[in-house]
Image: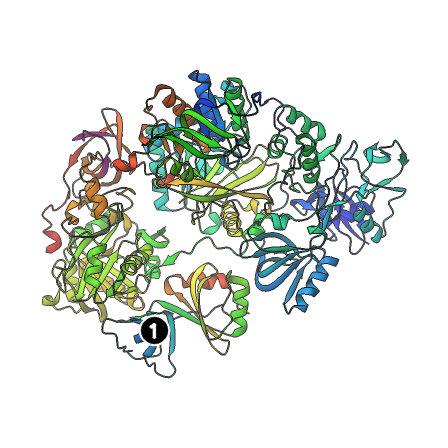
Amino acid sequence: MLACEPLIGWRIIADPSALDTAAWPAGSTVVRISPDDVYVIGVAEPTVSDPHAIVTPEHGFNGATLTAAQVADIAMRHIEWQLPSSRPALAQGQIAGVPSKLVLHADGSALLLVATAAHHELVARIGALA
Amino acid sequence: MSRLLYDGQPIEFADGDTVALAAIRNGQHPARGGTLCLAGDCGNCIATVDGTSWIRTCQTPARPGAIVGRHPDGTNPSMLGPDTMTAIEVRRHALDVVVVGGGSSGTAAAAEQRAAGHHVTVFDAGEGNEVVGTFAGPSLIVRTATGIDHVHAHHIVLATGQAELHPVCAGNMLRGIFTARAAAAVANAGIDLGVTVTVGADVLRFVGDGNVTAVVLQGGTRHECDAVIVDAGGAPRDLLARMAPNVPITIVGTAAAAHDLPPAPTAGVVCPCSKVSVEDLEGVWDKGFQELELVKRASLCGTGTCQGSVCGPHLQAWVGSRKGERPLPFTGRPAARQLTMGEAAAGYHIDTFRRTPLHEEHIALGAQLDKFGGWFRPWTYGDPVAEYWAVREGVSIGDVSTLGKMMVSGPDVVEALERIYPNHVHDIKVGRSRYVINLSERGHVLDDGMILREDDTRFVLSFTSGGASTAEMWVRDWIETWGLKVHILDRTVSHGAINVTGPLAGKLLQRLGVAEDAIPKFLQHRHLDVAGVPCHVMRLSFTGESSFELHHQIDRSRELWQALMHEGRSMGIRPHGLQALFGLRLEKGHVIVGQDTEMDSTPRRINMDWAVKLDKPRFIGRDALIRTASLPDERRLFGFTMDGPAPLEGSVIRVNGEVTGHVSSSWDSPMFGHAVLLGWQKHLPHADLVDIDGREARVSPTPFYDREGARARM
Amino acid sequence: MNEFVETLLDLPWQSETEPNPTYDVVIIGGGGHGLATAYYLATRHGITNVCVLDASYIGSGNSGRNTTIIRSNYGIPESVAFYQESLSMYESLEEETGCWIMHKTKGQLWMAHSTGTARTEQTRVLMNNACGAPSEYLSPAQIKEIVPQIDLTGGGRYPVQGSSYLHGGATARHDRVVWAYAQGALRAGAHIFQNTAVTGLVKDGARVTGVTTSKGTISAGVVLSAVGGHVSTVSKWADVRLPIRTHTLQAFVTNAYAQEFAPIVSSNDLVFYISQTARGQMLMGAEYDRQASYQRGTNFTYLQSVSAKAVTLFPFMAKLRILRTWAGICDVSTDFSPIMGYTNTSGFLLSTGWGTWGFKAIPAAGSQLAKLIADDKTPELIAPFALSRFEREVAMADPSSAGTK
């Protein structure tokens, strides 16, 4: 089964330019959800230059680390849309009917993100992993 | 040789036989008669195979032990076998060029595309990959040996060739008539058909009694035989292209070739699927059905399993001969080869049900959980009246994690919120909050909630559970339309919320570490630790009692809930479900948007003009409210009281025997010992006494309970 | 011959091959609504100088593309009364026209799979009974008796909690309804021209006085648009703006099977509806496509979702084979109710906003519009559905009754 555990991270909503120039500590995972929206895992308390930025703990996601083969298997069995071909990349859409995000790393592995409130559905639908 | 059962009789078949070939090998027709194409084009070999009816036996490999049954003559086939749905595997592929058809033109097209540097995938029905439909995308649905493939392609090439024309003349439903390709397939399988005669399009009639015994040509020549092979030309198999007129599809080979229609038939069965004869066509034509589509609809010609593959060209020719011009073929519609509904449904999930962070707590407490707006929520923990009294007299907690929760921040935030909400925003002080409604451009109530001010340029907004899913788009779309500088974060699913309510609610918070002087006053809010959990504590009231909503990160929800339950035990704490909550709020006269409101409910109609400040220069819905302000308006929501038991919600309200409205909310108030209601009167004059279920109800001002609102401030 | 070949009814076309220069009434759109209006004008009001024009063949639009359901279980009194009148007229339509329209009263279940929708369906029953549409609320066990094929657990995710049940729910063969009205109208002297596209309206000042067509200009006392799908275009010619968006609605049918599936079944939570045709096929539909469009295209997602819903409640359907999918385009008003009657442009009337529910309304709408044209006065039954309701802010809002969401 998919090991999809709760994640502790930060959410920053800020001017795109502030996010573009922000420095993230080494080892952190930075998910640029949209130009003004970043989700970061592995930082103590991030700061950005925008004084109006919303910087807040984000504990609403569960995540699972996937190998490249698992990504391909899930894509074939559960994703109706096409994944981006370049890496790294962020893909967002329904996986097995559940709104999800795939943080596709350069090495082919990926972090699957899903709202904690719906992760039980995703885990049940994906079932056994390749 | 292996065996299968055909209409209860064991028959032997050879390796590689289809079910149809197995029947032919045993001197039988796979169905009941008619020309066989053995290419999947017609419906003349259809039978029930292993419990599934309407199977083209020519496309179905024979399996040892298979149970095959002919469809009954003249009635529909039964569903056989168990109803269990076996899991059907779905695979998705993103491909470059897809060639449908592995014949000579398909092979040539594939080679050409490969030479041009494309990655080519060929789907050939003969190899078990049947393309059943083409759709926008472009996409294709392919039935494979193991399941269903959903294919996205950059380019689709159809090389599906031609279907062979069937003979339409007297006797054409006899057994023993084959198209040329079918006859070749039979010969390839080593099956001897006996004495065969090969003819062209010039057949006058087939002769026989069940089995064909002779064929008569138009010149009068007669051939005695055991089987007739008809080689009468073809018509393009272009349904996959016609069913997707806006999808770029290249057709190559004979599927693209111009073709002549056959001569208009004068006798025989035109449409074997629906059993329509030339005589039937003449009958409906003479009755005035003189368009191709009308002939089709009046006779059902072309509406059977093969969807006009057999009869289409003959019907076109027949109508053309009468109208003097060649009509267009029918609209092509999916599916080209029939999918079962199980195959179509495979891999699809209808919807997703969300769980609040307190789901397990509710289950442990024996809650009756049900789906509300896509969330599982507790309806009751078993005793809604006891839950009610816990709120009114002691303390209770409720899971309100499903409320819409948003943070907005930015230099233009006050201006943005002033435009979004019909109430004033600028004068909300930091640390204070205000009840607000949302209006559509037409001035209709969309939702309600709270605005809480965090600092000069930062607010927290709440929305109803029902409105949460569209709130972010609504707010974001407007703010971006206006070009205002505001950051927006929807926290609905990342924050939990527990409502602590009842006269002892404040005491419970104190026991959990909140200093007495730190407890927010009514409509104040503060960030406080409750039982060690950082909470945004919002003092407001839906139940009518002193209430504190504790908003917090969802990973702390269970800890907070358990601490509240534990510390509240000596106060008689009980959690409350939605059923008690709906009654509690009804006693306070609070509307539930969507239950008490309708899609055209203006603030005036629900007596909430007080939440609208028309002196503001602009807000969504203002123009509509001003335009309609002077119109006569008969529709109004009222409070009512009546003796119990409370009528069902939805009961009609009558005045002088006429239906004038309905009850939108109804509750047997434990406090009052009678029913309290909200309901609509939609016609003037509005009556003070109305009839509900044959009983008298009286209009009552709301709130029914604690009209001064003292208890929420206690 | 199959048992459904039309052998009884004929279409006695007028001898004229071209329209006359002038008619009292010109009706744009030869679907059920246009033909029924012509029929009732001629048979009930003696107005036979009527011409119905269709760009294609009669019934080529939504009249020949719907799922043939007749019901009256709406959520507001005005609609229940109107559709119940239509349902009753359908019950006697074979007698009235002498044509076999294959009408069959089957009853309609509208099921709930959650506490919230159970409340909606109970409300529906109360409202329907109060307004003349006999209904009751059924328990799961009662539902099982009516439709034994159902899985009451709803595949474990959608347990059936109960259902409203409209006793009078019925189906009729859509094409035959069109032909019955066409035959009656033609016999009474009305003209019907197929393959005659209306290309514009003729105006005298602000008043509409005729139509231009692919067969020339025709003068008219009044012009009724009974167009489905392109009503916004026609109305624009009359300078009438409509609160209408046009959407694609798909449907599909399976191969036939022998077992009887007695009622019409709808599901409020799952949002789909299903019934069995006289030929034994299962016929089903669901929501209209969310994106507004004039295309009659179908998509696979629709087949997937409706199949998944149907199979969830009726597992045997997993083995039924999909015969054919199709689509129509439907005009949906902002309050999900029809628009009938006069407009602010004199000489121009409308019958539109039929969304996904037009077939069931054909007899009532046709007869009432005929009465309106004959008497020059709006009958009480359709007065609430006047276009002016949007200006007056008196919407006939009933979103939960459209069988769609």
- Magenta residue check for B683: yes
Whether residue B669 is visible:
no
Residue C8's spot in the image, x, y percent?
61, 22
Label 1 marks which chain's residue?
A: A
Give residue B428's position: percent from left, percent from top: 13, 60
Between B475 and B155, the one lying in front of the other is: B155
Residue A9 to residue B393: above or below: below
Which residues are the magenta region? B679-691
Residue B247 lies left or right of residue B637; in this view the side is: right
Q: Looking at the image, which is closer to me, C6 or C84?
A: C6
Across and down, in percent, residue B487 comes to 27, 66
In the rendered image, the quadrant that contains the C terminus of chain C is: top left
Where residue B181 appears, as percent x and y from the top left, is 79, 49
Residue under label 1:
A8
Q: Which residue corresponds to the image point at 27% horizontal and 53% vertical from the top-left?
A: B464
Residue C238 as seen in the image, left or right of residue B435: right
- Residue at 84 percent across and 36 percent down: it is B212
Side of C167 where B127 appears, left or right: right
Quadrant the N terminus of chain C occupies: top right
Q: Nearer the viewer, residue B192 or B652?
A: B192
Q: How is the image coloured?
A: rainbow
The quarter holding residue B299 reads top right
Q: Is residue B197 above or below residue B113?
A: above
- For the image, the number of numbered tags is 1
- Is residue C10 found inside the magenta-colored segment of the image? no
Compared to residue B320, the image places residue B103 above or below, namely below
Describe the element under mark 1 as helix, strand or loop.
loop
